[in-house]
């Protein structure tokens, strides 16, 4: 990968594909990222692109994704489209020699994820899945506390991510053609947390509640580890509940309060009655932390992040594929029926 950033003052120029809610959050966060500038935005309609550009003072607005990846001023593209488009959009950007930060999940199955990674590697370009929570300081601190034995040996972790979606069957939450469902959209956060904090499980069990389109409206996954510790995870679009995580050990527990996947505090409760807490500040939403990692990697000529590597994305997607096989979740437009439907045929 050719380094064009020898000049310390030169900024990495971003383009954003997609103009939905997450793109707005990311554009706001980019304002505090060092050596970074938002150069272009693209939507399927010029009106939406121009409205976004006006809001964030973006120099270039495009009414097609293809036009953005052909912009010679853009160095890296943030893919903020629905996840059934991630592979298509990412491959297009990589083939136009753009680095890519792709919203999670990187693909909707392992085959797509590998195609994206192999294309980035072949072109010598940076690619990262936007698992933004990996870069949040309270989760990094939680990992540190567990590793140093602060709450003893881990016995149980419980992770919840559920909310009542008001959307109808054509919305991406519930539409099979859009690879909808709670697993890929929000359950991925629960799986990430278990993998990050506790590592690869020895085995798992999963149960899903499917709608008329065979989309998982609710899913429960349990990881079992070598030491008999369990991580019990729930995700749902049909239940309103606190989005909390707790890690229980032989000496106490760590509590991550509501919306644990966002910037927050760490609270520790010890069995002897003591308590401790850790508070962290972020400049914007926290998305700036993953964006800064992308910029730093590109400037250092790295094509993947050590914090959230290609192997991390592969491991996460491989487990999600296995969970879908176990629960009968199948995306007709993306999955190979003969190779994917091993459990539910």
Image: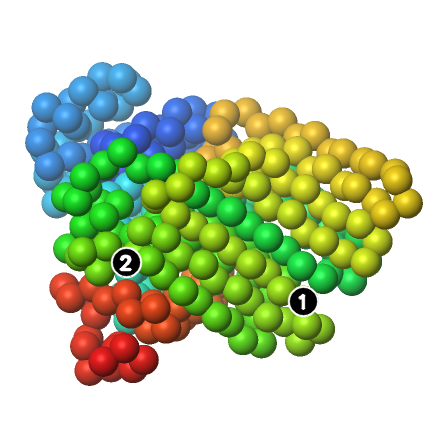
In the picture, the disc for residue 180 is none
Percent of width and height locating residue 260 = 56, 39
Q: Nearer the viewer, mark 2 or mark 1?
A: 2
Mark 2 closeness class: few <14, some 14–19, many ≥20 residues within 10 Å? some
Specify the label residue 229 is tagged with: 1
Along the horizontal axis of the image, is 88 left or right of 263?
left
Q: Residue at x 9, y 31 (%)?
A: 45
From the viewer's side, name the closer residue of 174 and 134.
174
> Does 334 sit above or below residue 286?
below
Q: Which corner quadrant holds the N terminus?
A: bottom left
The residue shown at (66%, 33%) is 265
Residue situated furthest right in the rendering: 272
Q: Is residue 23 visible?
A: no
Image-quadrant location for residue 209: bottom left
Asked if the residue under mark 1 is in contact with the one under mark 2, i.e. CB atoms within 8 Å, the reply is no
Q: Residue at x 18, y 39 (%)?
A: 168
Q: Nearer the viewer, residue 331 or 208?
A: 208
Give the residue at x 23% y 23%.
Answer: 52
Cα gap from disc 2 to disc 1, whole angstroms: 28 Å
Q: Quadrant of residue 238?
A: top left
Relative height, residue 281 to residue 14 (above, below)? above
Front residue (pair 267, 134): 267
Q: Which label number is shown at residue 210?
A: 2
Q: Is residue 234 visible?
A: yes
For mark 1, does the 10 Å Cα neighbourhood hold few (<14), some (14 to 19), or many (20 or more) residues?
some
Mark 1 or mark 2, which is nearer the start of the sequence?
2
Q: Position of residue 231 (x, y in %)?
A: 59, 61
Counting every numbered tag in the picture gives 2
Judge left or right: residue 227 versus residue 291.
Answer: right
**Which residue is more in the foreground, 104 or 88?**
104
Image quadrant holding the C terminus, namely bottom left
Q: Give SS at disc 1.
A: loop
């Amino acid at each position: 990968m050719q380094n064009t950033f020898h000049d310390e003052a030169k900024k990495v120029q971003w383009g954003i594909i997609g103009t939905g809610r997450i793109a707005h959050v990311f554009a706001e966060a980019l304002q505090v990222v060092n050596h970074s500038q938002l150069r272009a935005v693209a939507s399927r309609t010029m009106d939406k692109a121009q409205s976004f550009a006006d809001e964030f003072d973006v120099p270039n607005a495009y009414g097609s994704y293809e036009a953005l990846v052909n912009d010679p001023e853009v160095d890296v593209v943030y893919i903020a489209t629905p996840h059934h488009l991630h592979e298509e959009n990412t491959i297009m950007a990589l083939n136009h020699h753009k680095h890519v930060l792709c919203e999670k999940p990187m693909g909707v199955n392992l085959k797509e994820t590998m195609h994206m990674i192999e294309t980035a590697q072949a072109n010598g370009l940076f690619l990262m899945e936007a698992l933004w929570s990996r870069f949040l300081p309270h989760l990094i601190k939680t990992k540190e506390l567990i590793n140093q034995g602060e709450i003893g040996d881990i016995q149980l972790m419980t992770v919840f991510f559920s909310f009542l979606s008001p959307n109808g069957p054509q919305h991406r939450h519930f539409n099979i053609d859009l690879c909808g469902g709670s697993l890929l959209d929000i359950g991925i956060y629960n799986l990430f947390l278990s993998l990050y904090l506790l590592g690869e499980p020895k085995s798992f069990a999963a149960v899903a509640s499917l709608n008329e389109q065979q989309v998982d409206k609710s899913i429960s996954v349990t990881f079992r580890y070598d030491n008999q510790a369990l991580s019990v995870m729930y995700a749902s679009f049909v239940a309103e509940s606190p989005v909390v995580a707790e890690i229980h050990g032989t000496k106490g527990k760590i509590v991550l309060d509501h919306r644990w996947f966002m910037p927050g505090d760490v609270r520790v409760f010890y069995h002897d009655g003591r308590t401790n807490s850790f508070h962290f500040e972020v400049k914007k939403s926290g998305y700036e932390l993953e964006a800064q990692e992308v910029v730093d990697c590109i400037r250092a000529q790295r094509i993947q992040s050590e914090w959230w590597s290609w192997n991390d994305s592969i491991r996460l997607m491989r487990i999600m594929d296995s969970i879908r096989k176990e629960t009968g979740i199948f995306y007709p437009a993306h999955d190979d029926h003969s190779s994917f439907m091993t459990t539910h045929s």
